Amino acid sequence: MRNIILFCAAGMSTSLLVHKMKEAAEKENYECKINAYALASTKDKGKDADIILLGPQVRFSKAKVEKDCPGKIIECIDMQVYGTMNGAKVIAQVKKALGD
């Protein structure tokens, strides 16, 4: 069971992407928990993640997230993938990054 954490500015559009990712993961029988949080909670919420995904609007904070969550895999979600809410592509990105 993989723990996927998304960080974004406020969480509105990211919660929709989480829903799409859960649908895609279910279709692929990929066991994972997916949650989205505000960027301000990286230290608290990021520590239990297998992978941390950053929404395009907060990608400039990658260095801070790396500092707050040492040793974690941190990826930025492609702006076009995010904009089209393509959960399947994000799940594919996660699986590739984790080697699943």
Image (spheres, rainbow, N blue to C red):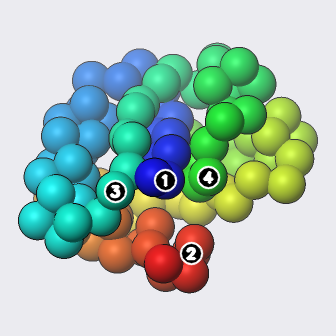
User: Which one is earlier in the sequence, the residue at label 4 or at label 3?
Assistant: 3
Is residue 100 visible to us here?
Answer: yes
In percent of width and height, residue 28 lies at 19, 71
Q: Are the residues at dot 4 and dot 1 in contact (C-beta closer than 8 Å)?
A: yes
User: Which one is earlier in the sequence, the residue at label 2 or at label 1?
Assistant: 1
Binning the other alpha carbons within 10 Å of mark 3 as few (below 14), some (14 to 19) or many (20 upward) gives few
- Label 4 and label 1: CA atoms lie apart by 6 Å
Question: Would you name the residue on which mark 1 appears?
Answer: 2
User: Which one is earlier in the sequence, the residue at label 1 or at label 3?
Assistant: 1
Q: Are the residues at dot 1 and dot 3 in contact (C-beta closer than 8 Å)?
A: yes
Question: Would you name the residue on which mark 3 appears?
Answer: 31
Q: What type is the residue that disc 3 sits on?
A: Glu
Q: Residue at x 26, y 31 (%)?
A: 15
Binning the other alpha carbons within 10 Å of mark 2 as few (below 14), some (14 to 19) or many (20 upward) gives few
Q: Which mark is residue 95?
A: none
In percent of width and height, residue 44 lies at 71, 19
